[in-house]
Image (cartoon, rainbow, N blue to C red):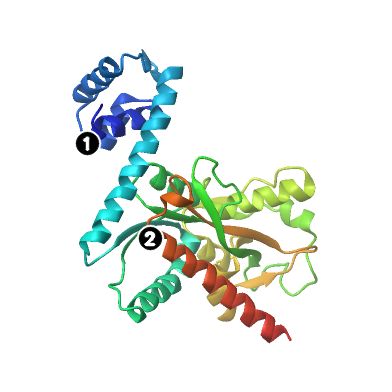
Amino acid sequence: MPDLGALELLVAVVRTGSISAAARETGVTQQSASARLRAVERQLGLSLFHRAPSGTRPTLEGEVVASWADDVLAAVGRFRTATRTLRGESTARLTVAASQTVSAQLLPPWLVALRGRQVEAGRTPTAVQLLSGNSTEAQALVRERHADLAFIESTEVPVDLGATTVDQDELVLVVAPGHAWNGGGPIAFEAAADEPLVAREQGSGTRRAWEDEVRRRLGRDPAEPAVVLPTSAAVRSAVAGGLGAAVMSRREAADDIRLGRLRAVRTAGEPVIRPITALWRGGARDLSPAARELIEVAVATAKERAAKQGRSAR
């Protein structure tokens, strides 16, 4: 039976398509990685890879064995979590990757609620490490085992990861106070789609959600951005400075709208709503207790907010 390190290497090669990339990921040299893979092939009596200068592709047998190896590694993870629980270790640890909107606007109250729940129950609070990026980067961190859980705001949910919707977020069109769109009636959705906007980079959940909504309503792509910026804060500053309009999370823009630096412009038709999704490796049974509890807190927080909004509307 190959050892666990060899199985991790095997899965990494199939996922990355490169022995060198898999070696870096698992912390071994490329020479050692190649030798371990050949040893696994000899142990199993199977040819697992097609090796070529352009990369390393799994054979049909290699894909099947890698899939089984992934199941074994997931079971090992559950075993480690269970034995830590039996030993009564004092602190559970959870690494969470989150897109910028989630990490700035949603995750802080979730973590406060999680800590409060655990302290009230007499348990040691989970130690959480946060890794922030865009939605695509957050997904990659989970796939590459650098994070246990990710939260993204993209409309595109990967099929190779476990997923559940925990909340939703509204996108809003924002402009500077002096913009021609400020103070008028609703802007036609087509006009907003035709406007070169200040936008986030490719891989951003905000940009993907807007592009998908334009395609859904109009059957075409929106105009190319006027400028592309790497953070929501940079987008807000550019719009406030008069560089153009932008589509962004209402949560992200709320403080600037309240202080008068930005104006929200209503577009005709239904609001643009996108899901907030939790992602992890494997299925529902592969969630660690800490990850499961954080997801429960996120869902409960969303329900409480919706209930408050319903009461205030009445």
Q: Residue at x 23, y 19 (%)?
A: 39
- Percent x, y for residue 130? 35, 60
Tell me where residue 37 sits by quadrant. Answer: top left
In the depicted structure, whether residue 208 falls above or below residue 259: above
Residue under numbered circle 2 = 289
Vertical comparison of 27 with 93: above or below? above
Indicate the amino acid at tag 2.
Answer: Pro
Asked which secondary structure carries label 1, the reply is: loop
Indicate the amino acid at tag 1. Answer: Gly
Q: Nearer the viewer, residue 34 or 102?
A: 34
First in sequence: mark 1 vs mark 2: 1
**Residue 174, position in %: x, y?**
64, 66
Which residue corresponds to mark 1?
27
Furthest toward the front, the residue is 86
- Using residue 153 as the reference point, say whether residue 9 is left or right of it: left
Q: Is residue 166 above or below residue 314?
A: above
Give the residue drawn at x 62%, y 52%: 209
Circle 1/circle 2 CB separation < 8 Å:
no
Count of numbered labels shown in the rendering: 2
Q: Badge 1, how many Cα within 10 Å: few under 14, some, many 20+?
A: few
The residue sitting at 67% across, 86% down in the picture is: 312
Q: Is residue 15 visible?
A: no
